[in-house]
Every structure is written in C-alpha cells, then in structure tokens.
Amino acid sequence: MAERSRGALSPQVALWILAVLAALFFLRAARTLIIPIAVGVLISYALEPAVAWLERRGVHRLAGACLAMLLVLGLLAGGGYLLRQDVTQVAQAVPQAVERARGTLQTALRTAGGSGSDAGAGGSQGDAATARGGSDDGSAARGGTGAATSGGGGGEGAVGTSGGGLAGGETGSLIQQAISATFAFAGHLVVVFFLILFLLISGHHIRNRIVEISGDGEQRRLTATIIDDINAQVQRYLLVLLFTGVIVGLATWGVLTWMGVQHAAMWGLLAGVFNSIPYFGPVIVSGGLFVVGMAQGGGVVEALQMAGAAIVITSLEGWLIAPPLMGKVERMSALTVFFGLLLWTWLWGPWGTVLAVPMLVIIKSVADHVDRFRPVGRLMAP
C-alpha cells in the first residue's frame, strides 16, 4: 500500500518540478516586460504610505499621488544636478586609473621576473652568437627576401586600411547600440512612471477586485490576508532598507571626507544606494573606490585604504547587520536571501539583484498562508 501511494505521488512531484522550471524560464524570457512592472509595483509600495497620509488629511488621492511623484522626480533631478560635476570627473578619471593600475602591474611583473632574466642571460648570449653565425651564412637569402618584403608593403597598407574600416564600422555599431539602449531605457522609465501613478491613484481598488474574483467565503479571506501580509512585509522591508542606507551613506561620506577622498559625497550616496544589495553591494562600492584611489595618484596602498574603509562600513551593515535584520523582519534566513540573490540575478541580471528580496518576500508570504506550500515556507524560515 505504501509503495502504491509513493508511486501515485511521483507524477505529481514531476509535474510540480516541470511547472517550476517552466515558470523560471518564462520569467527569464519575459524579463523585458516583467522588470518594469516589478519596479513600478515596488516603488508604489514605497510611496503608498505617503499618499495615504495625505489622503487622511483631506488631500484628494489623485493630487497626493501627483505630489508624491513630483517630489521623487524633483529629488532625483536635484541630486543629479548637484553631483553632475563629480560624475563627469570620475568618468574622465577612470581611464587614467586603469592605465596607472596597468603600469603598476607591469612594473611588479618585471621586478618579479628580473631574477629569472639574469639567470638566463648567459644562455641568451650563447644563443645570440649561434644566431649570428647562421645569419652570416644566409645573407644571400636575405637579399631575395628584402625584395619580397618591399613588394609586400602595399599589401600591409591594404590590410591596415581594411582594419581602419572595420574599426570605424565597430565604432558606428557601438554608437547605434548606445542610442538604442538609451531609447529603450527612456521607454522603460515612461512605463514605470505611469504604472506607479496609476497604482497610487487606484489605491485599494485592485486589491478589492482581486479578492472578489478569488472565490467565496474562506477563499476570499485567505486572499485578503495574503495581500495584506505582502503589503506589510514589503513596506517594512523598504523602511529597513531606507534606514540602513542612510546610515551607511552618511558613515561612508564622513570617513572618506576624513581621508581626503575626492567626491566623497557622491561615493557616500552610491554606498547608500548599493546597500540595497546584500552581500554584493560592499564589493561594488569598494571596487569603485579602489579605481578612484588609483586615479588620485596615491598608488596601490592609498587605493587599498580607501576601498578597505568603505568595505568595512558596508560589510558591518551588509554582512553582519542587514542579513539578521532582514531575516527577522521578513522571516527569512540569511541562506535563503543569498541563494535568492543568485537565482534572481540569473533570471533578471542586475535588476534581479535589486529585486531579489522583495520577490522572496512575496513567495514567503504566499507559502506561509497556503497549506500546500507550507513546506516551502518552512524551508525559507530562519
């Protein structure tokens, strides 16, 4: 009897595995459509408390939504205007930093290989003498080779011309790709903007319609509970994210200013923004500061000090403070968050890295309230 029940469960397990794999590949294939929707929904969660607060004070919801959107756009535009010179100078200094790092690496390699070169100098001299003897015997052959070489100059010139043409074609292709990427990004921004506005205006209308079509009685109560839990969990996550990002940004700004780092305010802002990416955020910020340290001309030691100061600050929050705090707020283990980052980065690239934790929050909330998925919720629990 037990064998028969196990055999009956096997097709069901296989179907669930196929369904999960199909869903994953669908999310990966449709990322161009889904990512702007996910970003818009997440930002609407962040702005909903402000719009609801204005509505409770007599401001119409449409006016409150427009006011919140204008405030966000104003902050982004003002921040970009204030930091425009810093961004331009850093972008111009990056090639210099790369050349400086390359020169330092080449010097280190030559220093490390100096002893081997000295040891092989005697053998090289012997080989050179042998080569000179052979070249005396083949002087006549070089006369004919010289004519062939002079005749091949035109061919080399033609190849060089062809190479220049290819380089020009590659440059044009890169420019076209950059223009296409810019227009695509602008189109996504427009979609995200109007999606956020419509979500804020609708308020609880969408939630109520979903609850109505979910079924009757207990099914409606379960759907309402899941949606409310998702709303509360995502909003608490964003609140914790904002709090920790401000702390990391201010601390990074202060330490880098004390160390005399150029554009410390911009790097503090970047540290606070990348703080939203657990585990990988500190690596990104410290790598950028290492490049800046090389660009300032301080050498490897100063660059390592700058990168180390930033990674200590972000690591204390991103590796030690944020995972336990997020695990407690979102009722997820640090291991779940880490594997979720890897999965969603594979699905959606850099945007998946940013959206990984909110997606995990939604999955965990559904799993906690649906009996069939409770094992998944227990697996994700701390």
Image (cartoon, rainbow, N blue to C red):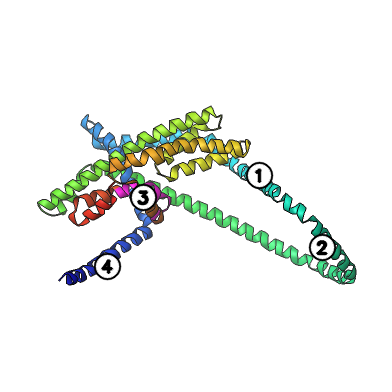
> In this rendering, which labeled residue sits more in front, label 1 or label 2?
2
Residue that carries the numbered disc 4 in the rendered image = 14
- Point out the image quarter for the N terminus: bottom left
Name the residue furthest left. 217
Residue that carries the numbered disc 2 in the rendered image = 127
Q: Is residue 74 visible?
A: no
**Residue 76 horizontal side relative to residue 166, left or right:** left
Residue that carries the numbered disc 1 in the rendered image = 104
Q: Earlier in the sequence, mark 4 or mark 1?
A: 4
Residue stretch rendered in magenta on the structure:
347-360
Q: Main secondary structure of the magenta part?
A: helix
Image quadrant assignment for residue 204: top left
**Is 355 inside the magenta-drawn segment?**
yes
Instruction: Identify residue type, mark 2.
Output: Asp
Give the residue displayed 70% in from the left and 47% down from the top.
111
**Residue 214 horizontal side relative to residue 170, left or right:** left
**Residue 44 horizontal side relative to residue 311, left or right:** left
Q: What secondary structure is found at the residue carrying circle 3?
A: helix
Q: Earlier in the sequence, mark 3 or mark 2?
A: 3
Q: Earlier in the sequence, mark 3 or mark 1?
A: 3
Residue 126 vertical placement versus 68 (above, below): below
**Is 39 inside the magenta-drawn segment?**
no
